[in-house]
Image (cartoon, rainbow, N blue to C red):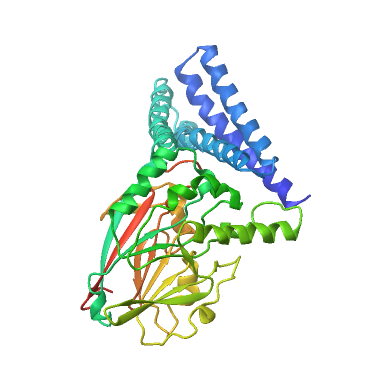
Amino acid sequence: MSRFFVALIIASLLFCLVEFYAFQALRTITKNRYIKLVWILVAVAIYINLFYTLYSTPRSAGQTLRFQMAVGLLLTILIPKLFIVLVMFGEDVVRVIYKLISYVSPGKTQAMPSRRLFVSKLALGLAAIPFASFIYGIIQGRYNYKVLKYQLSFEDLPDAFDGFTITQISDIHSGSFTNKEKIQYGIDLIKEQQSDLLLFTGDIVNNKADEMDNWIDVFNDFEAPYGKFSTLGNHDYGDYVQWNSDEDKAKNFQAVKDIHPKIGFDLLLNENRYIEKDGQRIALIGVENWGKGFNQAGDLQKASEGLNKEDFKILMSHDPSHWEYKVKHDDFNYHLTLSGHTHGLQMGIEIPGFFRWSPSQYVYKQWAGLYTEFGRFINVNRGFGYHAFPGRVGIWPEITVIELKKGTSTA
């Protein structure tokens, strides 16, 4: 039996377990058969829709959007039901313990017929919180753009660049967009920052170059005095969709690269540029995608050709695992790395300055925000767009503004 079918069987059993426990809570608090029937039919319809969509290979933007919505609907009902399962399963454990005690010491325990009803109400009440959060995340959360500002000090920053500002955006994923007015709001926020330099760190599309066709005019509306530069992300290579031939895939890849000059960005493909100001300069390096365990087209050595070790260097590298495994240890000294890729998994809990959690942190050591080691920095942008799940819950779309300062290092 193939691993796929084993995984499918295990997933089906887990889904059945979740649905069983969740339905027990509903059945405890209501005897209305129509409510129970609707509950079952909605769950069945969402599961059928998901499996149907999975077997329909995404070849167009429309099919990709249907896949994302199928995932969104599944998570919207499944995550709240997991809360129900935790509560109901915990109550069952208590019931078993009480039962065992009653066998050992008859008369030491007493029946609590109202407890099951109370626990069921509690479980459904708790489940309403993530349910409402996911609904909000799909309707509005994916457009809840946040401007995050950092000030970083470096002793070896050229004097002319004291106060120099950089706006970073990442992970546009234009194939997921549906609302031009909302996207324009995010674009206007980027323009309002009036930064000296504008950098985009990859994933301009989900899979295919034509996903960007309706958005060229929107993203061609930026100005930055010292230029606009970009690099590629893992989705820009077309690796996640089936192609009729290698030639078709190659043509799409070229078309993706051609998007960047159309919106006024200088695409850096394992290469670098000097940014000059008042007779001084800093180096900007852009590598192709390098990810731990998959696409590793990024070539740091090639991208740094012609630079000097003493140059102040800013590196654009889409996947933060590149910094973790290659960049931060490199004695060529890349002062600041800008990445994206993780999206912060588009869901989690974040209280700025106090608490931050997302399942993404179990996959990536650097998954959102600013990190420093060995006197070097990386900023992991949470992404401008969204992918797979058509929403954001707690981890909002991000526009990063970094101000460089001359002075004692903040590392």
- List x then y, in percent, for residue 118: 38, 24
In the image, is 48 to the left or to the right of 193? right
Tally of marks:
0
Residue sitting nearer the eye, 304 or 47: 304
- The residue located at (59%, 22%) in the rendering is 41
Q: Quadrant of residue 159?
A: bottom left
Front position in the image: 165 or 126: 165
- Please name the residue shown 74% across and 60% down the image: 246
Q: Quadrant of the C terminus?
A: bottom left
The residue positioned 56% from the left and 40% from the top of the image is 68
> Can residue 337 be seen from the camera position used here?
yes
Q: Is residue 151 left or right of residue 202?
A: left
Say whether residue 61 is left or right of residue 264: right
Give how far across and how far down residue 7 sits, in percent.
Answer: 68, 47
- Left or right side of 290 for 250: right
Residue 85 position within the rendered picture, expressed as x and y whole percent measured from the top left = 49, 35
Residue positioned 54% across, 49% down in the render: 212
Q: Is residue 268 above or below residue 185?
A: below
Residue 154 percent across, percent down from the top left: 26, 77
Can you see residue 396?
no
- Residue 149 falls in which quadrant of the image? bottom left
| Residue lying at the far left of the rendered structure | 407
Q: Quadrant of residue 51?
A: top right
Question: Is 177 drawn above or below residue 220 in the view shown?
Answer: above
Residue 217 vertical position relative to residue 246 in the rendered view, above or below? above
